[in-house]
Image (cartoon, grey):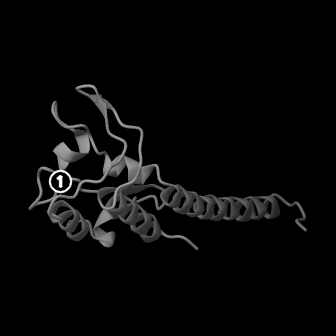
Amino acid sequence: MKSLNDIAIAYKDSALRAINPGVPFKGKTVRGRAYFNSRAVKDGNLFSQVASSNTIKGMTKLGKDKKSFTLTFNIAPNGAPYGKYVHNGTWKMAPRPFGEIAGESKSVKEAFDMYMNQVVESELETTFENMEDMFLKAGFKVK
């Protein structure tokens, strides 16, 4: 059974893996060069700041309707505000989009799919139970 925390854990792990040791990705060309590895570690500060500022509980928020949710990930935390330049790139430096890479990773997609399947299954069960009650009230016999 997957929860929002499982999605957040998978996302954070994938993002940190994209920072160090780095993962291959289809890079954008900057000044004639294409980057194919997302590794973004010089002294480890970005890695440690991203790891410590993105807590699992702080990354997820369930909507009031109990069906929607928000996943928040800070790519430029306090102590490493340059993370946005690493992620998005500059005119001299190609982007290393560790947040996007994490969102497209297999583990995040699997965790998301499992969570959504549970939400949909629960919603369908509730709907069918309500339909059964309506049929009984209307005088039908439900087997």
Q: In which quarter of the image is the C terminus?
A: bottom right
Up-down relation of residue 120 to residue 55 (above or below): above
Q: Is residue 102 left or right of residue 39?
A: right
Foreground of the two, 16 or 118: 16
Q: Position of residue 79 (x, y in %)?
A: 8, 62
Q: In this view, does 128 lie to the left or right of 66?
A: right
Picture quadrant of residue 21: bottom left
Foreground of the two, 98 or 71: 98
Foreground of the two, 33 or 126: 33
Foreground of the two, 120 or 56: 56
**Residue appearing at x 28%, y 67% in the figure:** 58
To which residue does mark 1 refer?
76
Secondary structure of residue under mark 1: loop
Furthest residue to the top?
Answer: 32
Q: Position of residue 103 (x, y in %)?
A: 42, 51
Q: Is residue 113 left or right of residue 97?
A: right
State how many labels appear: 1
Furthest residue to the front?
Answer: 33
The amino acid type, in three-letter code, at marker 1 is Ala
Q: Position of residue 12 (x, y in %)?
A: 35, 64
**Residue appearing at x 58%, y 74% in the figure:** 1
**Residue appearing at x 35%, y 48% in the figure:** 37
Q: Where is residue 56 in the image (x, y as percent from the top left)?
A: 33, 70
